[in-house]
Image: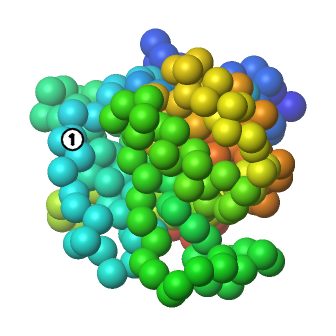
Amino acid sequence: MNFFKSKPIELPEHNCVLAHALKTLSLQKLVGKRIVLASNSPRRRDILRTFGLEPEIVPSTFDETLTHDEFEDVHEYPVATATHKAVEVYERLVKDDPNNAPDLVIAADTVVLTHPSPGISTTPFEGPSVRQEILEKPISKDDNLRMLLDMNGGVCEVVTGVSLVYPVLESPGYKIKSLDERTLVYFADNPRHLLEAYVESGEGVDRAGGFAVQGLGGMLVRKVDGDYQNVVGFPAASFFKFLELLHEEDHDFLEI
């Protein structure tokens, strides 16, 4: 069955569902819709494209000024950031062209935490009971090396918050739905010279946590427990399951 032949539909200039996409009901519902990714991340774009979804790219201008201390549960931080990104893009596009409002805006934010949440790892974090801290992008090569030395031989937790915004009739005119995905990354007990060589490659400088598991940083990692794509930047499996759930349970989803 081909979505594009199953019913007469006038496709917009940018059609987001690619020919190789799985023929699921939730993806079929996206055909002919204006779907926007509020990110210029090539990794998120490529992950979605792998699974047959190629949304319009409209990067968010949200100034990521949320402070970590605002959140009692640090896992709420990437969800809140993703929500602000999605709402900013949705409201801006509606204001710019009310007759061509997006049907769905997708936003995501990925953070790396210094150690696993209690109960999430089969290898307990051995150390004092302290709050998980968010590892930002390193500000220098020395900072990058410090991060890698701290994680070396241990476990960190990667969390991605994903928020979806879509139009509804009631105020404020849109609905927000969110999820978070958590994955553990186990680092090998790497010799210092390998960590230093990785830092000198420059790959980790622009990455939260200071490493890229899909690149040279994969040499430093011995195991990933959970969704690998989540560590790269977007939890595809959970996202598409979430679409299925919204399709089944929310009658407003993509119906306005």
In-image side of 139 versus 125 (left or right): left
Where is residue 69 shown, x and y percent of the image?
25, 71
User: What's the residue at 64%, 24% (across, down)?
Assistant: 197
Residue closest to the eye, 184 or 128: 128
SS type, badge 1: loop
User: What's the residue at 61%, 30% (across, down)?
Assistant: 196
Q: Amino acid at mark 1?
A: Phe
Farthest-out residue, right: 1
- Badge 1 density bin: few <14, some 14–19, many ≥20, Cα 10 Å: some
Q: Is residue 23 visible?
A: yes
Residue closest to the eye, 239 or 248: 239
Position of 12 relative to 110 (above/below): above
Where is residue 121 shown, x and y percent of the image?
73, 75
Q: Quadrant of residue 163?
A: bottom left
Q: Quadrant of residue 23?
A: top right
Farthest-out residue, top: 13
Position of 96 relative to 247 (above/below): above
In-image side of 9 versus 130 (left or right): right
User: What's the residue at 21%, 34% (across, down)?
Assistant: 61
Q: Is residue 247 visible?
A: no
Where is residue 72 shown, x and y percent of the image?
33, 81
Where is residue 133 shown, x and y percent of the image?
42, 65
In-image side of 87 versus 249 (left or right): left
Position of 51 relative to 130 (above/below): above
Quadrant placement of the N terminus: top right
Position of 225 relative to 149 (above/below): below
* Residue position marked by numbered label 1 in the rendering: 62
Q: Quadrant of residue 138?
A: top left
Residue closest to the eye, 91 or 2: 91
Q: How many numbered marks have been drawn onto this rendered protein structure?
A: 1
